[in-house]
Amino acid sequence: MKILIIDPYLTPSHELWLDHLSKGLPHQIFKLTLPPYHWKWRMHGGSLELAEKLINSGFVPDLILATEMLDLNIFMAHCRRHLKKNCRVIIYFHENQLTYPVSRMDMDRQKKFDNHYAFINFSSAVLADWILFNSEFHRQVFLDALIPFLKQFPGGTLLTSPDQLHNKSSVIYPGIDFEILMQEKKQFSNQVPVILWNHRWEYDKDPDLFFKVIRQIAAEGKPFQLAILGQHFHRSPPIFEAIRHSPLADRIVHWGFIPERKDYYQWLWKSDIIISTSKQDFFGISVVEAIIAQCYPLLPNRLAFPEHIPESHHAEHLYISEDDLLVKTRKLLDQWEESRRSTGYLHRHVTKYNPAKLIDQYIELFEKLM
């Protein structure tokens, strides 16, 4: 089987997903990608650019697996003469523009000028033979949001309902680099717990809340250090620069993005506690990577995070408010030696994200569609 995989916005996490598929699938794989710049233009122009690349390549796929940043309708229309009539199409939703939180810096989104990006996601889902989501939370929140979204448009009712999309959808989690991550495993005996931030330096990860809690427990004299990792951009939230020049700087053992995966994984193993304050995570790869590296997670009881924790342990690891996060962090630091000894259940739970287990799900789906 010849499979074309398309990603017009190849972020580092998408690249890992693509790499797992390329190495794991027993099929002939052809990849079409573009760098992760100017996301709005990628959603408009990427489909034409990549369609031209496919035509010029001479590759004729039996099945197309594309990410949600591609306008499938334009892509398929532009290269329809190049494709087989029975070519099957799957769209994989890493994110979506219907329920993604609005950035304070994006005036188009603030004024609701950008509904067409969400409509591209919807129309691509309609066209696809199958829809994949990276978490059960993501599937549910996207389908639930479609009804009020579609009602705002004039011209009658669209024939495709969310129920119809649900019936041709499923969840396959993105894989995590289990093997490489475990190769970097080392036993570190930190004198005090290292609290990890390994998320992107963006507003939707709510770094203001994270550092508010950190400042509070520091003011109480709790013993801890900070490892501040994660990808950052030219216009990162100002809280990061403020923290770097604050009294908390004395507690920082690492600051900044780590480009090499092996070095990054080593810092996960050096850390002890992973806290997320995210307002948006359709999966949360950075959190799962830290859990695999035996970091103790404190996560919001929302989004996809409950899927990463065994249900019987939700009360210990999931917080429901800012006050609850502060209480749980304080208690964890006070009882650190006791808490860190009994987290084997977390590692067992996240083995479901091992790429070796996920590849079989793709193969089964491909055979079903063909």
Image (tube, helix red, strand yellow):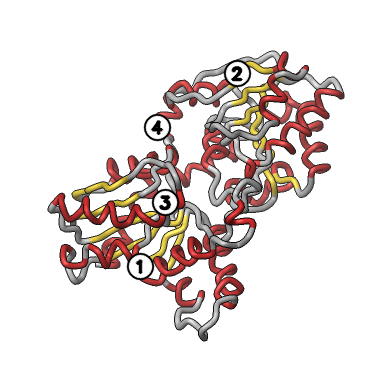
Residue 10 figure quarter: top left
Disc 3 from disc 1: Cα separation: 22 Å
**Residue at figure coordinates x 74%, y 45% from the top left:** 319
**Residue at figure coordinates x 28%, y 59% from the top left:** 64
Decide which of tag 4 and tag 2 comes sooner along the chain: 4
Circle 4 sits in a helix, a strand or a loop, which is it?
Answer: helix
Q: Nearer the viewer, mark 4 or mark 2?
A: 2
Circle 1 sits in a helix, a strand or a loop, which is it?
Answer: loop
Disc 3 from disc 2: Cα separation: 35 Å
Q: Which residue is mark 3?
A: 41
Amino acid at pointer 4: Glu
Decide which of tag 3 and tag 2 comes sooner along the chain: 3
Q: Quadrant of the N terminus?
A: bottom left
Q: Nearer the viewer, mark 4 or mark 1?
A: 1
Q: Are marks 3 and 2 in contact (CB under 8 Å)?
A: no
Disc 1 from disc 2: Cα separation: 44 Å
Amino acid at pointer 2: His
Q: Which residue is mark 2?
A: 254
Few, some or many residues within 10 Å of mark 1 (<14, 14–19, 20+): many
Q: Nearer the viewer, mark 3 or mark 2?
A: 3
Circle 2 sits in a helix, a strand or a loop, which is it?
Answer: strand
Circle 3 sits in a helix, a strand or a loop, which is it?
Answer: helix
Q: Position of residue 369 (x, y in %)?
A: 29, 67
Q: Which residue is mark 1?
A: 128
Q: Which residue is mark 4?
A: 179
Amino acid at pointer 3: Trp
**Residue at figure coordinates x 48%, y 61% from the top left:** 117
Disc 4 from disc 2: Cα separation: 25 Å
